[in-house]
Image: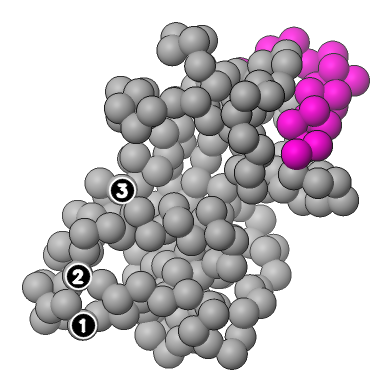
Amino acid sequence: MNSFFSILLGTSNTEKLQALSLLLHGLPLNLLSPEDFESRVGPDENGGTHHGNASLKAQYWSIQCDGLAIASDGGLVIPSAFGTWSSLYTNRTFADIKAKERPSALLELLDRYQITDRRAFWIEAVAIALKGDLVATWVARSSMGEIAHTVNEQVPVSGFWVNTVWYFSDLGKYYGSLSSEEIAISPDHWSVLHSEVRVFFEKYLINMG
């Protein structure tokens, strides 16, 4: 396979950049970020679904770099809170408050609407586009966890603030405390996407070479 193909990671979010980098780790690709280009502001996320948003972002960034781009869009799904909570607005629901305050805000929201079934999973869509045209898309979901009744103060709050309230009773741990081995046993969305994206690129790069 050739080692000179470049791909733009279509996000300015530090944690998402890391996630996309890990997704492509080990592949003969030159990874670029929006900082390598003049346009650093992404498109409006009005795709209506995570798949639609990921596709819009991949197409937009592939036009900006005039080449290959990858982007993703995801959110926390709480099935019993349909109508009260939407995975599409996982971050935007609490956009006006700091990340460290969002876990408590989610717990307050569930309590306010008396949501007793707290099962939850994460859904993530990934899209790849070349010069504005979609090349491939995937949608994956994590294993089922639940929203805890308390925030785990021992888990650092980051951009992925769900870490501190998303609990897996079978492992007795919050998502933010899971080791890579535990995530492999109880696959998360990125683990599922990793294998599918690798299979795609192994074939794609051979064909392009």
* Residue in view at x 74 percent, y 26 percent: 81
- Among numbered discs 1 and 3, the one appearing first in the sequence: 1
Residue 136 shown left or right of residue 144 in the figure: left
Which amino acid type corresponds to the residue marked 1 in the rendered image? Phe
Q: Are marks 1 and 2 in contact (CB under 8 Å)?
A: yes
Q: Which type of secondary structure does the marked residue at label 3 adopt? A: helix
Q: Does the magenta stretch include residue 194?
A: no
At x 44%, y 26%, the residue is 178
**Residue 201 horizontal side relative to residue 84, left or right:** left
Among the 4 quarters of the image, the one containing residue 167: top right
In the displayed structure, would residue 8 be above or below residue 76?
A: below
Dot 3 or dot 2, earlier in sequence = 2
Q: Is residue 141 above or below residue 88?
A: above
Give SS at disc 1: loop
Position of the N terminus, as image quadrant, is bottom left
Residue 2: x and y in percent read 12, 78
Image position of 115 with respect to 159: above or below: above
Q: Which colour scheme is used?
A: one colour
Q: Is residue 113 magenta?
A: yes
Sequence-wise first label, 1 or 2: 1
Q: Residue 28 carries which label?
A: 2
How many numbered marks are there?
3
**Rendered image quadrant of residue 203:** bottom left
- Report the quarter where the C terminus lies: bottom left
- Three-letter residue code for mark 3: His
Q: Which residue is drawn at 43% across and 90% down?
A: 66
Magenta range is: 100-119
- Residue occupied by mark 1: 4
Q: Provide the secondary structure element on which disc 2 rests.
A: loop
Q: Where is residue 35 in the image (x, y as percent from the top left)?
A: 54, 80
- Work out how far the residue at label 1 is from the one at label 2, CA to CA, in angstroms: 7 Å
- CA gap between label 1 and label 3 equals 21 Å
